[in-house]
Image (tube, rainbow, N blue to C red):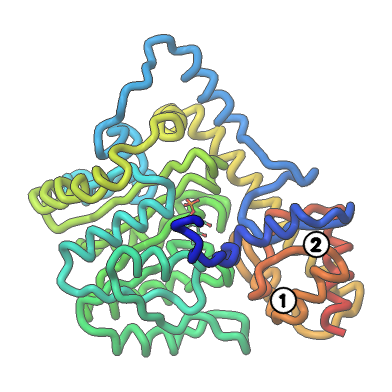
Amino acid sequence: NSVFAHVVKAPEDPILGVTVAYNNDPSPVKLNLGVGAYRTEEGKPLVLNVVRRAEQQLVNDRSRVKEYLPITGLAEFNKLSAKLMFGADSPAIKENRVTTVQCLSGTGSLRVGGEFLARHYHERTIYIPQPTWGNHPKIFSLAGLSVKTYRYYDPATRGLNFQGLLEDLGSAPSGAVVLLHACAHNPTGVDPTIQQWEKIRQLMRSKRLLPFFDSAYQGFASGNLDTDAKPVRMFVADGGECLLAQSYAKNMGLYGERVGALSIVCNTADVANRVESQLKLVTRPMFSNPPIHGASIVATILRDRNMYDEWTVELKAMAERIISMRQKLFDALQTRGTPGDWSHIIKQIGMFTFTGLNKEQVAFMTKEYHIYMTSDGRISMAGLSSKTIPHLADAMHAAVT
Ligand code: PLP
Protein backbone atom coordinates (compact mmCIF):
# COMPACT_ATOMS: atom_id res chain seq x y z
CA ASN A 1 0.00 0.00 0.00
CA SER A 2 1.73 3.18 -1.23
CA VAL A 3 2.18 6.11 1.12
CA PHE A 4 1.18 8.14 -1.93
CA ALA A 5 -2.03 6.23 -2.57
CA HIS A 6 -4.11 9.33 -1.81
CA VAL A 7 -2.40 11.41 -4.54
CA VAL A 8 -4.93 12.39 -7.16
CA LYS A 9 -3.99 12.67 -10.82
CA ALA A 10 -3.41 16.29 -11.77
CA PRO A 11 -4.80 17.70 -15.01
CA GLU A 12 -2.36 18.22 -17.90
CA ASP A 13 -0.85 21.69 -18.24
CA PRO A 14 -3.30 23.70 -20.39
CA ILE A 15 -0.58 24.59 -22.92
CA LEU A 16 1.84 21.65 -22.83
CA GLY A 17 -1.15 19.28 -22.53
CA VAL A 18 -2.12 20.28 -26.07
CA THR A 19 1.10 18.68 -27.34
CA VAL A 20 0.38 15.52 -25.33
CA ALA A 21 -3.02 15.21 -27.02
CA TYR A 22 -1.45 15.98 -30.42
CA ASN A 23 1.19 13.28 -29.98
CA ASN A 24 -1.56 10.74 -29.24
CA ASP A 25 -3.43 11.51 -32.48
CA PRO A 26 -2.51 9.10 -35.31
CA SER A 27 -4.01 11.29 -38.08
CA PRO A 28 -1.55 12.25 -40.86
CA VAL A 29 -3.11 15.70 -41.26
CA LYS A 30 -2.82 16.64 -37.58
CA LEU A 31 -1.53 20.11 -36.80
CA ASN A 32 -0.14 21.42 -33.50
CA LEU A 33 -0.78 25.15 -33.08
CA GLY A 34 -0.69 25.00 -29.30
CA VAL A 35 2.83 25.48 -28.16
CA GLY A 36 4.74 28.69 -28.86
CA ALA A 37 7.75 27.31 -30.67
CA TYR A 38 8.95 28.43 -34.07
CA ARG A 39 8.70 26.02 -36.98
CA THR A 40 10.13 26.32 -40.49
CA GLU A 41 8.04 26.34 -43.69
CA GLU A 42 8.61 22.56 -43.61
CA GLY A 43 7.14 22.35 -40.09
CA LYS A 44 10.51 21.54 -38.51
CA PRO A 45 12.10 23.01 -35.36
CA LEU A 46 14.84 25.51 -36.21
CA VAL A 47 18.31 25.82 -34.75
CA LEU A 48 19.68 29.18 -35.89
CA ASN A 49 22.81 29.06 -38.00
CA VAL A 50 24.49 31.57 -35.73
CA VAL A 51 23.72 29.36 -32.73
CA ARG A 52 25.36 26.39 -34.48
CA ARG A 53 28.42 28.56 -35.18
CA ALA A 54 28.62 29.72 -31.59
CA GLU A 55 28.32 26.16 -30.33
CA GLN A 56 31.07 25.04 -32.69
CA GLN A 57 33.35 27.76 -31.31
CA LEU A 58 32.57 26.69 -27.76
CA VAL A 59 33.26 23.03 -28.50
CA ASN A 60 36.56 23.84 -30.23
CA ASP A 61 37.79 25.88 -27.31
CA ARG A 62 39.68 23.28 -25.27
CA SER A 63 40.29 25.77 -22.48
CA ARG A 64 36.59 25.68 -21.59
CA VAL A 65 35.74 23.69 -18.49
CA LYS A 66 32.51 22.64 -16.83
CA GLU A 67 33.04 24.37 -13.48
CA TYR A 68 30.10 25.89 -11.61
CA LEU A 69 29.13 29.41 -12.56
CA PRO A 70 28.84 31.99 -9.76
CA ILE A 71 25.38 32.14 -8.09
CA THR A 72 24.52 35.11 -10.32
CA GLY A 73 25.53 33.25 -13.49
CA LEU A 74 27.84 34.20 -16.34
CA ALA A 75 28.87 37.82 -15.76
CA GLU A 76 29.41 38.67 -19.42
CA PHE A 77 26.04 37.19 -20.35
CA ASN A 78 24.37 39.35 -17.69
CA LYS A 79 26.03 42.54 -18.91
CA LEU A 80 25.20 41.88 -22.54
CA SER A 81 21.61 40.93 -21.74
CA ALA A 82 21.03 44.20 -19.89
CA LYS A 83 22.58 46.07 -22.81
CA LEU A 84 20.38 44.24 -25.31
CA MET A 85 17.21 45.45 -23.62
CA PHE A 86 18.15 48.81 -22.10
CA GLY A 87 20.39 49.92 -24.99
CA ALA A 88 24.13 50.43 -25.33
CA ASP A 89 23.94 54.03 -24.11
CA SER A 90 21.57 53.44 -21.21
CA PRO A 91 22.37 55.80 -18.31
CA ALA A 92 21.06 53.18 -15.84
CA ILE A 93 23.79 50.77 -17.01
CA LYS A 94 26.49 53.45 -17.10
CA GLU A 95 25.62 54.49 -13.56
CA ASN A 96 25.75 50.83 -12.39
CA ARG A 97 22.15 51.03 -11.22
CA VAL A 98 21.18 47.74 -12.87
CA THR A 99 21.72 44.34 -11.34
CA THR A 100 21.29 41.35 -13.63
CA VAL A 101 21.29 37.71 -12.59
CA GLN A 102 21.14 34.75 -14.93
CA CYS A 103 18.07 32.58 -14.31
CA LEU A 104 16.29 29.59 -15.83
CA SER A 105 14.81 31.20 -18.92
CA GLY A 106 11.85 33.58 -18.67
CA THR A 107 9.91 31.44 -16.22
CA GLY A 108 12.77 31.20 -13.73
CA SER A 109 13.48 34.93 -14.03
CA LEU A 110 9.85 35.77 -13.24
CA ARG A 111 9.88 33.41 -10.28
CA VAL A 112 13.09 34.81 -8.81
CA GLY A 113 11.82 38.36 -9.30
CA GLY A 114 8.53 37.41 -7.64
CA GLU A 115 10.25 35.85 -4.64
CA PHE A 116 12.54 38.84 -4.23
CA LEU A 117 9.53 41.16 -4.20
CA ALA A 118 7.66 38.95 -1.71
CA ARG A 119 10.64 39.16 0.64
CA HIS A 120 11.74 42.75 0.24
CA TYR A 121 9.03 44.91 -1.27
CA HIS A 122 6.36 46.61 0.81
CA GLU A 123 3.39 46.02 -1.51
CA ARG A 124 2.81 42.32 -2.16
CA THR A 125 0.12 42.69 -4.81
CA ILE A 126 0.93 42.12 -8.45
CA TYR A 127 -1.49 43.08 -11.22
CA ILE A 128 -1.36 40.90 -14.31
CA PRO A 129 -3.24 41.52 -17.56
CA GLN A 130 -6.53 39.76 -18.24
CA PRO A 131 -5.90 37.47 -20.09
CA THR A 132 -2.22 36.60 -19.81
CA TRP A 133 0.17 33.70 -20.23
CA GLY A 134 -1.33 30.87 -18.15
CA ASN A 135 1.79 30.40 -16.05
CA HIS A 136 1.86 33.97 -14.68
CA PRO A 137 -0.74 33.60 -11.87
CA LYS A 138 0.86 30.37 -10.65
CA ILE A 139 4.42 31.71 -10.76
CA PHE A 140 3.57 34.81 -8.74
CA SER A 141 1.24 33.24 -6.21
CA LEU A 142 3.77 30.50 -5.46
CA ALA A 143 6.40 33.21 -5.13
CA GLY A 144 4.30 34.65 -2.32
CA LEU A 145 2.57 37.56 -4.04
CA SER A 146 -1.12 38.24 -4.16
CA VAL A 147 -2.29 38.22 -7.78
CA LYS A 148 -4.93 40.57 -9.17
CA THR A 149 -5.82 41.35 -12.77
CA TYR A 150 -6.25 44.51 -14.83
CA ARG A 151 -8.42 44.73 -17.92
CA TYR A 152 -6.41 44.37 -21.11
CA TYR A 153 -8.26 42.76 -23.99
CA ASP A 154 -11.58 43.78 -25.48
CA PRO A 155 -13.29 40.80 -27.15
CA ALA A 156 -15.64 43.16 -29.04
CA THR A 157 -12.82 44.92 -30.92
CA ARG A 158 -10.29 42.10 -30.53
CA GLY A 159 -7.96 44.91 -29.53
CA LEU A 160 -6.74 46.69 -26.42
CA ASN A 161 -9.22 47.74 -23.73
CA PHE A 162 -7.18 50.86 -23.07
CA GLN A 163 -9.85 52.64 -21.03
CA GLY A 164 -10.32 49.58 -18.81
CA LEU A 165 -6.57 49.24 -18.37
CA LEU A 166 -6.18 52.87 -17.28
CA GLU A 167 -9.14 52.60 -14.89
CA ASP A 168 -7.85 49.42 -13.26
CA LEU A 169 -4.27 50.62 -12.87
CA GLY A 170 -5.63 53.98 -11.72
CA SER A 171 -7.49 52.31 -8.87
CA ALA A 172 -4.67 49.92 -7.91
CA PRO A 173 -3.12 50.62 -4.50
CA SER A 174 -0.10 52.91 -4.64
CA GLY A 175 3.11 50.90 -4.94
CA ALA A 176 1.49 47.78 -6.42
CA VAL A 177 3.55 45.74 -8.86
CA VAL A 178 2.26 45.64 -12.45
CA LEU A 179 3.27 42.91 -14.86
CA LEU A 180 3.62 44.24 -18.41
CA HIS A 181 4.38 42.17 -21.50
CA ALA A 182 7.29 44.08 -23.05
CA CYS A 183 6.04 43.27 -26.57
CA ALA A 184 3.99 40.67 -28.47
CA HIS A 185 1.46 40.09 -25.70
CA ASN A 186 0.68 36.42 -25.14
CA PRO A 187 -2.01 35.18 -25.80
CA THR A 188 -3.73 38.15 -27.47
CA GLY A 189 -1.10 39.49 -29.87
CA VAL A 190 -2.35 42.97 -28.88
CA ASP A 191 0.20 45.59 -27.79
CA PRO A 192 -0.34 49.21 -26.75
CA THR A 193 0.85 51.83 -29.25
CA ILE A 194 3.84 53.96 -28.25
CA GLN A 195 1.44 56.82 -27.37
CA GLN A 196 -0.57 54.46 -25.18
CA TRP A 197 2.63 53.19 -23.53
CA GLU A 198 3.52 56.77 -22.70
CA LYS A 199 0.13 57.27 -21.01
CA ILE A 200 0.61 54.01 -19.08
CA ARG A 201 4.07 55.15 -18.00
CA GLN A 202 2.81 58.51 -16.77
CA LEU A 203 -0.03 56.92 -14.83
CA MET A 204 2.20 54.25 -13.30
CA ARG A 205 4.92 56.69 -12.28
CA SER A 206 2.40 59.15 -10.81
CA LYS A 207 0.87 56.33 -8.75
CA ARG A 208 4.27 54.81 -7.90
CA LEU A 209 3.25 51.49 -9.42
CA LEU A 210 6.27 49.24 -9.92
CA PRO A 211 6.69 47.88 -13.47
CA PHE A 212 7.74 44.27 -13.90
CA PHE A 213 8.38 43.63 -17.59
CA ASP A 214 8.14 40.16 -19.04
CA SER A 215 10.18 40.04 -22.25
CA ALA A 216 9.80 36.67 -23.95
CA TYR A 217 9.65 37.96 -27.53
CA GLN A 218 12.16 40.79 -28.07
CA GLY A 219 12.71 40.94 -31.84
CA PHE A 220 9.81 38.63 -32.60
CA ALA A 221 7.14 41.33 -32.73
CA SER A 222 8.57 43.77 -35.26
CA GLY A 223 11.60 41.79 -36.40
CA ASN A 224 13.82 44.47 -34.80
CA LEU A 225 15.37 44.14 -31.34
CA ASP A 226 15.55 47.88 -30.64
CA THR A 227 12.01 48.61 -31.81
CA ASP A 228 10.64 45.90 -29.53
CA ALA A 229 12.68 47.24 -26.60
CA LYS A 230 11.16 50.73 -26.87
CA PRO A 231 8.44 50.46 -24.20
CA VAL A 232 10.94 49.18 -21.62
CA ARG A 233 13.45 51.88 -22.54
CA MET A 234 10.78 54.57 -22.03
CA PHE A 235 10.32 53.38 -18.45
CA VAL A 236 14.07 53.30 -17.80
CA ALA A 237 14.69 56.69 -19.41
CA ASP A 238 12.53 58.42 -16.79
CA GLY A 239 14.98 57.39 -14.09
CA GLY A 240 12.46 55.23 -12.23
CA GLU A 241 12.90 51.68 -11.02
CA CYS A 242 11.61 48.48 -12.63
CA LEU A 243 12.13 44.74 -13.01
CA LEU A 244 12.70 42.81 -16.21
CA ALA A 245 12.53 39.08 -16.97
CA GLN A 246 14.24 38.17 -20.26
CA SER A 247 14.05 34.92 -22.18
CA TYR A 248 16.17 33.73 -25.10
CA ALA A 249 13.85 30.78 -25.76
CA LYS A 250 12.10 32.28 -28.77
CA ASN A 251 14.36 34.98 -30.18
CA MET A 252 17.44 32.74 -30.23
CA GLY A 253 15.53 29.47 -30.44
CA LEU A 254 17.18 28.27 -27.23
CA TYR A 255 13.97 26.87 -25.71
CA GLY A 256 15.38 23.82 -23.95
CA GLU A 257 18.63 25.50 -22.90
CA ARG A 258 16.64 27.49 -20.33
CA VAL A 259 18.58 30.71 -20.69
CA GLY A 260 17.27 33.99 -19.36
CA ALA A 261 17.95 36.83 -16.97
CA LEU A 262 16.33 38.93 -14.29
CA SER A 263 17.35 42.59 -14.18
CA ILE A 264 16.37 45.05 -11.50
CA VAL A 265 16.88 48.71 -12.33
CA CYS A 266 17.42 50.67 -9.11
CA ASN A 267 17.77 54.30 -8.12
CA THR A 268 21.42 54.13 -7.16
CA ALA A 269 24.39 51.81 -7.59
CA ASP A 270 24.44 51.22 -3.87
CA VAL A 271 20.83 49.97 -3.82
CA ALA A 272 21.51 47.78 -6.88
CA ASN A 273 24.46 46.23 -5.10
CA ARG A 274 22.41 45.38 -2.02
CA VAL A 275 19.53 44.07 -4.14
CA GLU A 276 21.94 41.75 -5.94
CA SER A 277 23.23 40.36 -2.66
CA GLN A 278 19.64 39.46 -1.75
CA LEU A 279 18.92 37.95 -5.17
CA LYS A 280 21.73 35.52 -4.47
CA LEU A 281 19.92 34.43 -1.32
CA VAL A 282 16.83 33.73 -3.43
CA THR A 283 18.55 31.69 -6.14
CA ARG A 284 21.12 29.77 -4.08
CA PRO A 285 18.59 27.48 -2.34
CA MET A 286 16.43 27.34 -5.50
CA PHE A 287 18.92 26.08 -8.11
CA SER A 288 22.31 26.96 -6.60
CA ASN A 289 23.69 28.41 -9.82
CA PRO A 290 22.42 28.51 -13.42
CA PRO A 291 23.54 26.31 -16.36
CA ILE A 292 26.57 27.36 -18.39
CA HIS A 293 25.96 26.19 -21.95
CA GLY A 294 23.05 28.33 -23.11
CA ALA A 295 24.43 31.48 -21.50
CA SER A 296 27.77 30.87 -23.21
CA ILE A 297 26.04 30.61 -26.59
CA VAL A 298 24.25 33.91 -26.00
CA ALA A 299 27.41 35.67 -24.78
CA THR A 300 29.38 34.38 -27.79
CA ILE A 301 26.80 35.83 -30.17
CA LEU A 302 26.19 39.13 -28.39
CA ARG A 303 29.86 39.99 -27.95
CA ASP A 304 30.78 39.53 -31.59
CA ARG A 305 29.57 42.21 -34.04
CA ASN A 306 29.51 39.81 -36.94
CA MET A 307 27.57 37.09 -35.13
CA TYR A 308 25.21 39.64 -33.64
CA ASP A 309 24.41 40.91 -37.13
CA GLU A 310 23.86 37.38 -38.38
CA TRP A 311 21.48 36.79 -35.48
CA THR A 312 19.42 39.89 -36.30
CA VAL A 313 19.05 38.70 -39.91
CA GLU A 314 17.87 35.25 -38.83
CA LEU A 315 15.56 36.74 -36.21
CA LYS A 316 14.03 39.07 -38.76
CA ALA A 317 13.45 36.13 -41.11
CA MET A 318 11.54 34.28 -38.38
CA ALA A 319 9.44 37.36 -37.58
CA GLU A 320 8.73 37.95 -41.27
CA ARG A 321 7.68 34.37 -41.89
CA ILE A 322 5.18 34.71 -39.04
CA ILE A 323 3.88 37.99 -40.45
CA SER A 324 3.46 36.40 -43.89
CA MET A 325 1.49 33.53 -42.31
CA ARG A 326 -0.92 36.12 -40.89
CA GLN A 327 -1.56 37.53 -44.35
CA LYS A 328 -1.94 34.07 -45.91
CA LEU A 329 -4.42 32.89 -43.29
CA PHE A 330 -6.41 36.10 -43.61
CA ASP A 331 -6.46 35.74 -47.43
CA ALA A 332 -7.51 32.09 -47.19
CA LEU A 333 -10.51 33.02 -45.03
CA GLN A 334 -11.44 35.85 -47.42
CA THR A 335 -11.31 33.42 -50.35
CA ARG A 336 -13.65 31.04 -48.54
CA GLY A 337 -16.03 33.86 -47.68
CA THR A 338 -15.82 32.89 -44.03
CA PRO A 339 -18.36 35.00 -42.12
CA GLY A 340 -17.04 37.61 -39.69
CA ASP A 341 -14.29 40.21 -39.56
CA TRP A 342 -10.88 38.52 -39.49
CA SER A 343 -8.74 41.63 -39.80
CA HIS A 344 -7.40 41.07 -36.28
CA ILE A 345 -5.34 38.21 -37.72
CA ILE A 346 -3.20 40.72 -39.61
CA LYS A 347 -3.38 43.42 -36.94
CA GLN A 348 -2.16 41.31 -34.03
CA ILE A 349 1.54 41.06 -33.26
CA GLY A 350 4.02 38.33 -32.43
CA MET A 351 3.81 34.59 -32.30
CA PHE A 352 0.11 34.17 -31.61
CA THR A 353 -3.27 35.03 -33.02
CA PHE A 354 -6.13 35.25 -30.58
CA THR A 355 -8.71 34.06 -33.08
CA GLY A 356 -11.86 34.73 -31.11
CA LEU A 357 -12.93 31.09 -31.66
CA ASN A 358 -14.71 29.77 -28.58
CA LYS A 359 -14.13 26.54 -26.66
CA GLU A 360 -16.78 24.61 -28.59
CA GLN A 361 -15.37 25.74 -31.94
CA VAL A 362 -11.86 24.75 -30.82
CA ALA A 363 -13.12 21.33 -29.71
CA PHE A 364 -14.87 20.91 -33.08
CA MET A 365 -11.67 21.74 -35.00
CA THR A 366 -9.69 19.26 -32.94
CA LYS A 367 -12.27 16.49 -33.34
CA GLU A 368 -13.05 16.97 -37.03
CA TYR A 369 -9.79 18.44 -38.38
CA HIS A 370 -7.13 17.19 -35.94
CA ILE A 371 -6.01 20.76 -35.26
CA TYR A 372 -4.70 21.31 -31.74
CA MET A 373 -4.67 24.65 -29.90
CA THR A 374 -5.40 26.02 -26.45
CA SER A 375 -9.11 26.19 -25.61
CA ASP A 376 -9.04 30.01 -25.55
CA GLY A 377 -8.72 29.97 -29.35
CA ARG A 378 -5.07 31.01 -29.44
CA ILE A 379 -3.10 29.70 -32.40
CA SER A 380 0.64 29.79 -32.85
CA MET A 381 1.33 31.45 -36.20
CA ALA A 382 4.88 30.12 -35.98
CA GLY A 383 3.51 26.58 -36.25
CA LEU A 384 1.84 27.27 -39.63
CA SER A 385 3.17 26.93 -43.15
CA SER A 386 1.84 27.64 -46.65
CA LYS A 387 1.00 23.94 -46.88
CA THR A 388 -1.06 23.78 -43.68
CA ILE A 389 -2.95 27.08 -44.00
CA PRO A 390 -5.66 25.73 -46.35
CA HIS A 391 -6.44 22.95 -43.85
CA LEU A 392 -6.66 25.46 -41.00
CA ALA A 393 -8.81 27.84 -43.03
CA ASP A 394 -11.18 24.98 -43.95
CA ALA A 395 -11.45 24.07 -40.28
CA MET A 396 -12.08 27.65 -39.16
CA HIS A 397 -14.65 28.13 -41.90
CA ALA A 398 -16.49 24.96 -40.88
CA ALA A 399 -16.29 25.90 -37.19
CA VAL A 400 -18.05 29.24 -37.66
CA THR A 401 -20.63 28.29 -40.28
N1 PLP B 1 6.44 34.93 -20.64
C1 PLP B 1 5.61 34.76 -21.66
C2 PLP B 1 4.58 35.78 -21.93
C3 PLP B 1 5.72 33.62 -22.45
O1 PLP B 1 4.88 33.47 -23.47
C4 PLP B 1 6.71 32.66 -22.16
C5 PLP B 1 6.80 31.44 -22.96
O2 PLP B 1 5.90 30.97 -23.58
C6 PLP B 1 7.57 32.91 -21.08
C7 PLP B 1 7.41 34.06 -20.34
C8 PLP B 1 8.70 32.06 -20.62
O3 PLP B 1 9.20 31.10 -21.39
P1 PLP B 1 10.57 30.39 -21.02
O4 PLP B 1 10.53 30.06 -19.58
O5 PLP B 1 10.56 29.19 -21.90
O6 PLP B 1 11.64 31.36 -21.35
Amino acid at the residue labelled 1 = Ser
Query: Residue drawn 86% across and 66% down?
Result: 369
Is any part of residue 153 visible from this angle?
yes
Q: Is residue 33 above or below residue 55?
A: below
For badge 2, the amino acid type reads Lys
Marker disc for residue 343: 1
**Rendered location of residue 67, percent (x, y):** 32, 22
Asked if 269 appears above or below 326 in the picture, the reply is above
- Percent x, y of residue 41: 78, 46
As measured in the structure, the alpha-carbon distance from the residue carrying label 2 to the one carrying label 1 is 12 Å
Question: Residue 328 got which mark?
Answer: 2
Element under disc 2: helix
Q: Position of residue 321 (x, y in %)?
A: 70, 51
Q: Residue at x 30, y 87 (%)?
A: 170
Quick one: 292 or 253, which is closer to the camera?
292
Q: Answer with left or right where residue 185 lies relative to residue 273.
A: right
Labels in figure, total: 2
The residue lying at 79 percent from left, 65 percent from top is 329
Looking at the image, do the residues carrying marks 2 and 1 touch, with CB atoms under 8 Å apart? no
Please tell me whether residue 193 is drawn above or below residue 220 in the rendered image.
below
25 vs 57, nearest the viewer: 25
Task: Characterize the local packing of mark 1: few (<14), some (14-19) or many (20 or more) Cα atoms within 10 angstroms.
Answer: some
Q: Can the viewer see residue 79 in this picture?
A: no
Most extreme residue toward the front is 1
From the viewer's perspective, is 340 left or right of 201? right
Q: Residue furthest top?
A: 62
Say what secondary structure mark 1 lies in.
Answer: loop
Q: Give the answer, above or below, for where 192 lies relative to 106.
A: below
Q: For the point 60% across and 46% down, which residue is it?
A: 316
Q: Residue furthest left?
A: 270
